[in-house]
Amino acid sequence: MNDLTRREFLRRSVLAAATASFGVLVARANQQEKVRVGVIGTGAQGQNLLRQLMSMPSAEVVAVCDLYAPHRIRAVELTQFQAQGYADYRAVLERKDIEAVVIATPLHLHAPMTLDALQAGKHVFCEKAIAYTLDEARQMAQAAQRAGKILQIGHQRHYNDTYHQAHQLIKEGAIGRITHVRVLWHRNNNWRRPVPDPKFERLLNWRLYKDYSHGLLTELASHQLDVVNWFLGALPHSVVGYGGIDYWQDGREVYDNVELIFNYPNGVRVMYTSITTNAYDGYGEWFFGDKGTIILTNETSGLLFRERSAGKLAWEDDANTVQVDGRRGVVIEPTPTRRAPQRGEQLAQYGQRNAYYAQLEHFLQCVRTGEMPRCTAADALPALACVLGAKTAIETGTMYLFKPEEFQIGKV
């Protein structure tokens, strides 16, 4: 096999087979009639998802909905005026020709809109975090089961090839036994959007107010704690935390910084921080094992560092590597090649499709075939339980002890 070890050859063969299999499934779905979709909530994230849908052969966006007129008008423009615009989401649900809806509204509206959509016979893709409360999340999961409809939650890293590659390396023991995890999301901005009129303050800056969001915890931490639960294959026993409105004295009601320590089984400690006053460290997840470290610092690439005492992996000499602070790091790529990616290069995911595209494409495929998505309500609920437990720990100044039933959807 010349330049390839047998293990790496098999690895690439498996990846190629998986990619080919996914392509066949997508091709089959695309041969069928397009799924007629309505998009409810067309702010920044809703417009991102709308752009993905408009580029899909399997989707036909026929309705867009937003209470805020500029967002609604922009969404209609993005569909090249093919979709009807609505201010009331119930008008979208009343349309018999719509099979599925994408919900990208403020957090407090996820549950009521999803429940109404399921009752109206629609399949639902709902953005993360799944809901404002655990009870609401359970209601959503149970309603989807009763209705026999697809309910997919938008934790898009479940459709990110780099994350899957990193998860596979962990399963294979590339970093040994994990003992610690460091997770952070650091920014240097007030997280506030410009408002053309004070009457739109809470409508546009809903993330900053308690009635609509839990702030950094649900909007950012839920993404990353979902990954931690997935990679560890475990759920936390307890959490302690700090947080406050310590810098941005601008009328917000949610914390502008949070610092958390979770205790997981087998003595694993997970440290999470999210701040809004310094962006030096940026964003990332660090998984520390006794044989190595995996670092994921964006959604398209990662690095594997082996401990010096651990020796080389069988396929390591054939992998792309970089030097970081005198250490040799293996580049984690969706499709291994012998050429390291250039700075700023977008790595291929499902043939140049990003994770947002991939998750929506699979949602439409699930609607047509009855498959289950990679992130169901049952998959998404534990991340919500983690951040709500952390919120309680911060508010009470005590250690919060999780109960096993907090992570379960319960019986229908």
Image (spheres, rainbow, N blue to C red):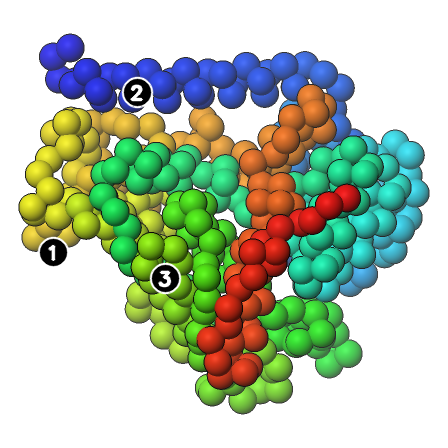
Of residues 367 and 306, the one drawn nearer to the viewer in this rendering? 306
At 91% across and 34% down in the image, what residue appears?
96
* Cα–Cα span, label 3 and label 1: 24 Å
The residue positioned 76% from the left and 52% from the top of the image is 139
49 with respect to 147 (left or right):
left
Say the numbered circle drawn on residue 325.
1
Residue 123 quadrant = top right
The residue where tag 3 is placed is 270
Q: Is residue 141 above or below residue 337?
A: below
Regarding mark 1 in the picture, which secondary structure is present there?
Answer: loop
Q: Is residue 220 left or right of residue 231?
A: right
* Residue at horizontal 17 percent and vertical 46 percent from the top: 291
Q: Position of residue 127 (x, y in %)?
A: 64, 51
> Mark 1 belongs to which amino acid?
Asp
Within-10-Å neighbours for mark 1: few <14, some 14–19, many 20+: few
Q: Residues within 10 Å of mark 2 (few under 14, many from 20)?
A: some
- Check contact, mark 2 vs mark 1: CB within 8 A: no
The residue that label 2 is drawn on is 12
First of labels 3, 1 by sequence position: 3
Residue depth check, mark 2 versus mark 1: number of the one nearer the observer: 2
The circle on residue 307 is none
Element marked by disc 3: strand
Query: Does label 2 or label 3 sit earlier along the sequence?
Result: 2
Q: Name the residue type under label 2.
A: Arg
Quadrant of the image occupied by residue 72: bottom right
Q: In the displayed structure, would residue 6 be above or below residue 358?
A: above
Residue 286 visible in rendering? no
